[in-house]
Image (cartoon, rainbow, N blue to C red):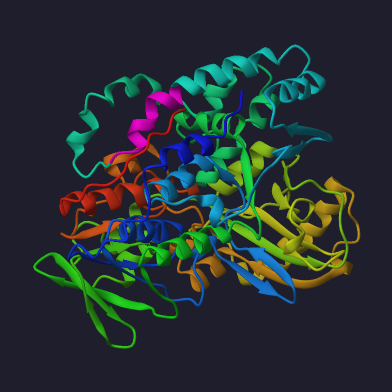
Amino acid sequence: MQSDDSHLLRNAMKDLGPSGSSPTGGKVIIIGGGPGGVASALLLASRGIEVHLYEKHNRLGGRTGCHEIDGYRFDIGPTFLMMKSLLDRIFVEAGLDSADYLEFTRLDPMYEIRFDDEIFRACNDTEDTKKEIERLFPGQSAGMDRFLKKEKSRFSKLLPAFQRDFSQPLHSLAPDLLPALPHLSLGSTVFDNLKKYFSDEKLALLFSFQSKYLGMSAWECPGAFAMLSYMEHEHGIYHTKGGLAEIPIGLGKAAEDCGANIHLNTPVKELIIENRKVVGVELENGERELADNVIINADFAHAMTHLVPDGEIKKYTKAKLEQMKFSCSTFMMHLGVKKVYDLPHHSIIFARDYRKNVDEIFKLNCSSDDISFYVRNAGVTDPTLAPEGKSSLYILVPTPNLDGDVDWDEVQDRYRSMVFKAFSDRLGIDDLEENIEVEKIYTPKTWNQELDIFKGATFNLSHCLSQMAWKRPRNQFEEFKNCYLVGGGTHPGSGLPTIFESARISSNLISDSLGLKYSKTEITA
């Protein structure tokens, strides 16, 4: 069964509306206009708080932004919207409706996976997906029912942990969290858990690639994250018209409608700290802006190494950051091509020797000759992304981050050539290079230098057990008073759904500190 909770959330809106009230006296500065920053701006402004968001670029979004070249539009980062209800809830709790700011399409099939010479379609309807399993793996479809039932139970038990703050370690012992402990699958991996449902190893792999949303290998990612695939199959995958970069733009418009002040082309130089308390920010232009609370939505490790004055950091020093674990990175190509290819909206292509490729990325930190890659061909759903008769292609190849022993200036052209060869060998497309009109390439070095992502780790801090819950940098940041974090580098983690939750958690903490009353809506598994 699949569900779309948006109608339930809209019913919850009936007695709500933008506060329209005068400011409470509280002022919040937000550094960075990524999805977590603008979601926080919307929530706080709707509650009557004076909000000023400073974004260094001329657009909102951060790595959920876009660039437009010669009529082609490209999302920079995320392309899958899952758990849409969590995004809807941000609007609902601000007294608004996401449908007034964004146009959504639920995808079917959700995606295709190519392995060996087979194609597996993950469908929007469970029975259709089971037919796909039977077509390729006769006798294995019953595992899908066991998978959905067990992972729904896991998700329902763990959901409270993703929706609360861990500003104090004792918060993990709250009574409503104790039932979650048996569902953490401590000591097992995503792949271990999936093998309990699907005895065929290749079939289990088809439900495992979601661990890469966290920048991790399915053979290392904590077992509880097997529920990521459940979330897709139960709640669907969505596209937003114009690309997922429209999400922070829509959130930003809604925040401004509620009174937030958004300042583009306005980089922050550093935090202003007095006696371990953040009292404001200094802008690059030399202006000093004071506030009651400051939210950091910049890449966490970049913020610690660039936005905090020298000598102020005690816990997350440069030495400490070097010891922490970070996600993988990506080699990406954004291609504007002068024809339309017969590809689905989302395609995931496994390397011929998938396990070797994964080990090269996550264990050996080296380049690969046999690549796995992902292609978004969103024009089949959304014709606004390219001129008529043409396509905007997004190609992603997982790679080591900058800890790896790879000279990206040297190997960039080799990866580019490997992509064209893989298109020919695995997709039967021989003419991609000759049809290119627009091309932009991202390497781990690009992520680091152009988007201020520490080590080029596209998916932020790793989600190993030593960097989750209270062991992750906390929403109410432990280093300084009146300082809060949102984004992938804090609890509950990276990926759009959890980033929205981080915004909600930090916004609620600030609202609680001001004694504000605000709306809360519940999300179920």
Front one among 23 and 358 = 23
Which percent across, then down, holds residue 435?
A: 87, 68
On the image, the x and y values in percent for residue 386 come to 77, 66
**Residue 159 colored in magenta in the image:** yes
On screen, residue 522 above or below 135: below
Residue 482 falls inside the magenta stretch: no
Residue 330 visible in rendering: yes
Reply above or below: 259 against 425: below
**Overall secondary structure of the magenta stretch?**
helix
- Residue 267 versus residue 80 in the image, above or below: below
Q: Quadrant of residue 118?
A: top right
In the rendered image, residue 342, in percent from the top left (x then y), is placed at 87, 49
* Residue extending farthest left: 275
> Observer-nearest residue: 508 or 477?
508
At x 36%, y 67%, the residue is: 260
Percent across and percent down for residue 511 are 22, 52
Q: Where are the magenta residues, as a range?
A: 154-164
Q: Residue at x 63, y 30 (%)?
A: 207
Which quarter of the figure is the N terminus placed in?
Answer: top right
Residue 474 visible: no
Residue appearing at x 42%, y 25% in the figure:
156
